[in-house]
Every structure is written in structure tokens, then in C-alpha cells.
Image: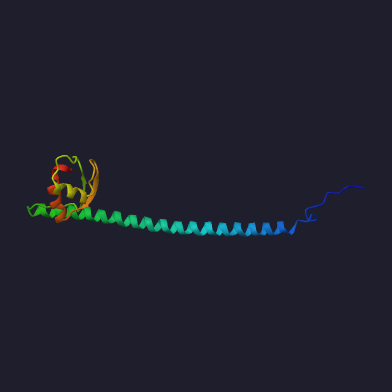
Amino acid sequence: MGATVPTNDQILVPETLLKKRKSQEKARAERTDAIEKKKAANKEKRQVIFKRAEKYVQEYRDAEREKIRLHRVAKAEDSAFVPAEAKLIFVVRIKGINKMPPKPRKILQLLRLLQINNGVFVKVTKAITEMLKVVDPWIA
């Protein structure tokens, strides 16, 4: 009597294993679909971001060219070109609180400059300009 080895077709696989394999294959297929969709969405998003960056670069180049053109026009007319002032400034506190009057102290609090070497970005307005004149000895 020869003992024969059963083939793969003859081996019975429990139904729970078959169900498990089927669910795993389904989950794997769903995962790959999700990955493909995510890759496509990311590619599209990158293109949008790139176009936006290109637009910003073009905008700054145009502004620079316009500034140069205005300089040339002013030079041709023998007049002076006055560039626009900055809209934003960075203010740093450089002195401490000793012997400080109450008004500058309050202004520094409003500007959130409570410690030495603190800095804040401030939008330039008439009111801010006046405040900065008052606290000029304590800021840079």
C-alpha cells in the first residue's frame, strides 16, 4: 500500500479560512483603490499649488518691472521717484523697565513688548507711528 500525498485540490480548507482570505483580498483591493485616488488627488493639488506659486512669482516680477519703469520715467523727466513706504515693520524692545514713565510703559504693553529682546510685526498706520515715536528710546 503506497501512501499518496494529496494534491492541493484534494485538501479541504476550512470555510472560515476561505471567508478570511476573501475579506482580506477585498480589503487589499479597497486599500489600493484608496491609495490610487489619494495619489491622483495629491498630484492635482500639487499642480494647483505650483500654479499659485507661479502666479505669485509673476506678480512680483511685474511689480519690480513697474518700479524700474517708474524710475526710468522719472529720470527722463528730470524728477525724482519716491518709492512707497513699507506697510509692515518689525519692532524690537531694547531697554528695560527701569525709570520708565507710565505712558511709554502702556504703549509697550499694547505692542506686546513686555520683555527685552521681544519683537513684533506691526502694520504701519498713523496711530502706530505716533505710538512708536513716544517709545522710540526703548525700541529698535
Residue at the image point whose x is 36% and y is 57% from the top:
51
Viewer-closest of 86 and 128: 128
Horizontal side of 69 relative to 33 (left or right) equals left
Image coordinates of residue 68 in percent, x first then y, are 18, 52
Which of the 4 image quarters holds residue 74?
A: bottom left
- Above or below, 41 against 89 in this view is below
Viewer-closest of 83 and 77: 83
Horizontal side of 36 relative to 112 (left or right) equals right
Whether residue 89 is visible here, answered yes or no, is: no
Q: Residue furthest left?
A: 78
Query: How did the renderer colour the structure?
Result: rainbow
Residue at the image point whose x is 88% and y is 47% from the top:
3
Image coordinates of residue 52 in percent, x first then y, are 34, 57
Whether residue 37 is visible here, answered yes or no, is: yes
Image coordinates of residue 99 in percent, x first then y, are 14, 40
Which of the 4 image quarters holds residue 62?
A: bottom left
Question: In the picture, which quadrant includes the C terminus?
Answer: top left
Q: Residue furthest right?
A: 1
Viewer-closest of 36 and 16: 16
Residue at the image point whose x is 55% and y is 59% from the top:
33
Image coordinates of residue 114 in percent, x first then y, are 23, 45
Label count reads: 0
